[in-house]
Amino acid sequence: LVNMPCSVSVMQESANQIEIISIPDLLSDAIAEIRAVCIEEIGVWMKMYSDAFLNDSYLKYVGWTLHDRQGEVRLKCLKALQSLYTNRELFPKLELFTNRFKDRIVSMTLDKEYDVAVEAIRLVTLILHGSEEALSNEDCENVYHLVYSAHRPVAVAAGEFLHKKLFSRHDPQAEEALAKRRGRNSPNGNLIRMLVLFFLESELHEHAAYLVDSLWESSQELLKDWECMTELLLEEPVQGEEAMSDRQESALIELMVCTIRQAAEAHPPVGRGTGKRVLTAKERKTQIDDRNKLTEHFIIALPMLLSKYSADAEKVANLLQIPQYFDLEIYSTGRMEKHLDALLKQIKFVVEKHVESDVLEACSKTYSILCSEEYTIQNRVDIAHSQLIDEFVDRFNHSVEDLLQEGEEADDDDIYNVLSTLKRLTSFHNAHDLTKWDLFSNCYRLLRTGIEHGAMPEQIVVQALQCSHYSILWQLVKITEGSPSKEDLLVLRKTVKSFLAVCQQCLSNVNTPVKEQAFMLLCDLLMIFSHQLMTGGREGLQPLVFNPDSGLQSELLSFVMDHVFIDQDDENQSMEGDEEDEANKIEALHKRRNLLAAFSKLIIYDIVDMHAAADIFKHYMKYYNDYGDIIKETLSKTRQIDKIQCAKTLILSLQQLFNELVQEQGPNLDRTSAHVSGIKELARRFALTFGLDQIKTREAVATLHKDGIEFAFKYQNQKGQDYPPPNLAFLEVLSEFSSKLLRQDKKTQIFRIWPQHRNNKGKRKRTPVKSQPNTMCPV
């Protein structure tokens, strides 16, 4: 119709006829493509011949189609509206439509189909651009929170909306004049303050990287104004300028670090996007230019920022993330070594002032980055780092001697001196090889004293365990990278053996943090020093292989049963309703998941006997929400290792549950009870894991039935041979696996049952035993 060479009046008359005859029918057509084409053409009419067609008679069809069940149709509808709202002259004619359908359009920003949601946000942005009064504060807030969406196109579209809403009234000339009067170099101060306030009001402080990424395409110039950000942080407010609060300063530092990361890495944060993509030549050049720009600026500014905020752990930990994005060659090529010395001096002050793990780890990581061998500044940084470690090792050795001499009479100062220096050294030992300072010896002395006398503070024990662990790992790194002698191997073996013994003894410590730390380190070391250490042509490391004995395996399993499979509500029954308590519960669950995962890896890699997994598998249903994914993955991996042994482990877990139930309820079980149904449901879930290929799982399923039947008839009834065995009800549980048996194997399983009953020393009758009601044969 659009291309027909006829007058508008003729077209309108034709369209009226089409409307009467076809449009309602076309828009309700069963085929989505027809509805989409129809609404698209209506949009073309209204745009090209707005005087004739842009009225409520046609707009009503567009409004109705916003509710179409097919995303394709809704998408065409939104794009048709976008073409209308782009023309500012058409806004008066769209006012009634906007008022009537605005709520629907805003709600479509949450559409289940992301393409539709993106176009809905763009349409709302056009409405905002045409008339700010058209959208209420509530409408805007519904779009604001989408900047934190995990779907990047949605977030970027929301970022464009936020940019227009926050910065649309910005007058560059007025801002520049105001900045000059205040002695500022950048006119963006007020805009950055507005961004900080928005970030704080959103109350999603851990998602600063998402906010920055959402605004990156629309507000990149503002977000890369690092000079303005450092001005706001370093300089005192002038007359007429409001001082930033502590929260605002923290938020600005966090946002600033996120903008630095975005510029230096040139890809979205983790969790948004499918991964790193290959940059174009233009994008690569922009990335290099941005990295040079931020490096040149923060090489000078960072020491000043650290000096001002050195007492604030949160701010310092964030600021110390910046050096990892530097082009470190600029220190040398730009003759900026004095600024490097200033940075190293400030980091030393921070290490001496703080014991918070986040701050110390950030300092350690910064030293590690600056010590990289590929840069000429490495020697200068290494000297400063060694001097710092020398100082703290000397302090640690003296404080340990004082603490051990004082014994039970040690005061808080003695304890603090040991703990504070040990925390610092442990944080540095994680990223740096400190074996030449032999921290293991004094850490081991502290651990042995704690075991023998039981008076060592738990935090010292936890830190000593971790520091010893790092020391062992660095010793192993040296051996694997070099050509070790037999004596070197024996020395390390002795060290590992003594430390494993200490960790095993710590499993019975009264303090939960100590026990958890010892358990995790035991699992890690048993994994590292397992038979896999010899793979890749490293058979010479065989003396370092440790296999846990049955006693240690039992202790590890008992620890998992006592500290993982517990009722979280009972553990935290005093914590209800408080957000902080809820956070503590989540953190406690995270710890327990880590404990279970650490032990499960030992099973998967054949370090702990597979039958130990039975105690884990039996909790699959009860703790499905907390650990279901871990247990399922463990089951899958063990089956890949040994199908038959895995099947034996599965049936063993069901037998354990059955025995526990018999002990609780006695031999006469109520087979309709929830407990019995729970065991059967678990068996059904286990059966599903065998898949559909009966040939592949034939031997494993047959072995499972064999073990299950033997268990069912293992014991005789105390009332006599004519009464059913006490475990006969277990056949009901076993029947859940019967669908996985091949037909020929079912006969084999039947003969396992009846001869066992009929031919007991030749005294049994050929008639079946007296059976309990509802007993099922598993075939």
Image (cartoon, grey):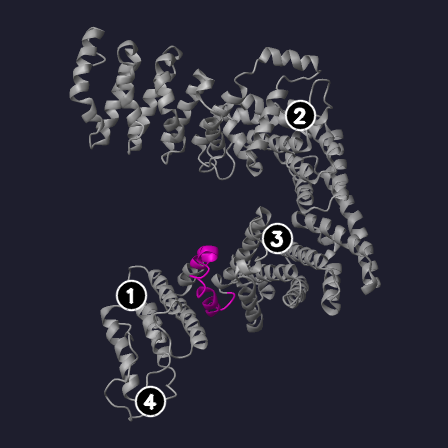
Looking at marks 3 and 2 on the same chain, the residue that comes earlier in the sequence is marked by 2
**Residue 534 on the magenta segment:** no
Q: Do labels 3 and 4 touch, CB within 8 Å? A: no
Q: Earlier in the sequence, mark 4 or mark 1?
A: 4
Q: CA distance from mark 1 to mark 3?
A: 50 Å
Q: Where residue 171 appears, x then y in whole percent? A: 57, 13
* First to last magenta residue range: 607-633
Lower position in the chain sequence, tag 1 or tag 2: 2
The foreground one among 49 and 544 is: 49
**Label 3 neighbourhood size at 10 Å, few (<14), some (14-19), many (20+)?**
few
Circle 2 crowding by C-alpha within 10 Å: few under 14, some 14–19, many from 20: some
Residue beneath disc 4: 721
Q: Which residue is mark 1?
A: 740
Of labels 1 and 3, the one closer to you: 1
Q: Quadrant of residue 311?
A: top right
Q: Looking at the image, do the residues carrying marks 1 and 2 touch, with CB atoms under 8 Å apart?
A: no
Q: Is residue 593 left or right of residue 404?
A: left
